[in-house]
Amino acid sequence: MGRLVSAVVLFYALEKLAVLLAVPLLLGAAWLKYKIHRMDGDKWDRYFRAMPNRKYAALFFVFYTIPLLAVAGVAFLIYRHFQFPEPALTALLLVALGELRAVRKLDDHKAELWAKLRKLDRATGRSEEPGGAQKQGRE
């Protein structure tokens, strides 16, 4: 029983570590884009206004999946060191459950997220429905 509890606690801690690592990864990507494309306030504004709403969600998953995979590699080593059964499967389970948890959280807050994106769309004069179809609004 103690081994199961320790596995669950480690699993939860590693998943939280992946969330924490996603933030500097996202900031680093923004910094690289800033340096490479010489982004200023207007360029950033145009970049985010031109981005479809679905791309926001896709970027979220990319910047969450990369650290989740890295943490899964560390998890595999930890699970193998402490001789947990099936360390590779347990590490892959971390990735799968982490992604499912992110999907569930996005789904739970979907109405709030789409409302904020629609508010941004109204400010920019464009609109995109959750189904992915873009509509051009009047400015």
Image (tube, grey):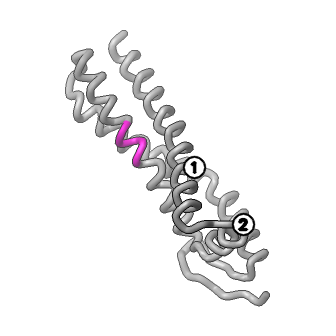
In magenta, the rendered stretch is: 66-70
Return the x and y of residue 77 as percentages of the image width and height. Answer: 27, 26
Q: Is mark 2 on a helix, strand or loop?
A: helix
Q: What element carries label 1?
A: helix
Q: In which quarter of the image is residue 48?
A: bottom right
Is residue 9 part of the magenta span, yes or no? no
Location of the N terminus (image quadrant): top left
The residue to which callout 1 is attached is 27
Location of the C terminus (image quadrant): bottom right
The residue to which callout 2 is attached is 41
Instruction: Specify the amino acid type for callout 2.
Output: Gly
Q: How crowded is mark 2: few (under 14 residues within 10 Å), some or many (20 or more)?
A: few
The residue lying at 54 percent from left, 37 percent from top is 20
Label 1 or label 2, whichever lies nearer to me, is: 2
Q: Can residue 1 be seen in this view?
A: no
Q: Is residue 132 visible?
A: yes
Q: Which of 44 and 95 is in front in this view?
A: 44
Return the x and y of residue 19 as percentages of the image width and height. Answer: 51, 39
User: Seen in the image, is 127 located left or right of residue 57?
Assistant: right
User: Seen in the image, is 107 located left or right of residue 79?
Assistant: right
Please say if 42 is above or below 17. Answer: below
User: Seen in the image, is 9 located left or right of residue 28?
Assistant: left
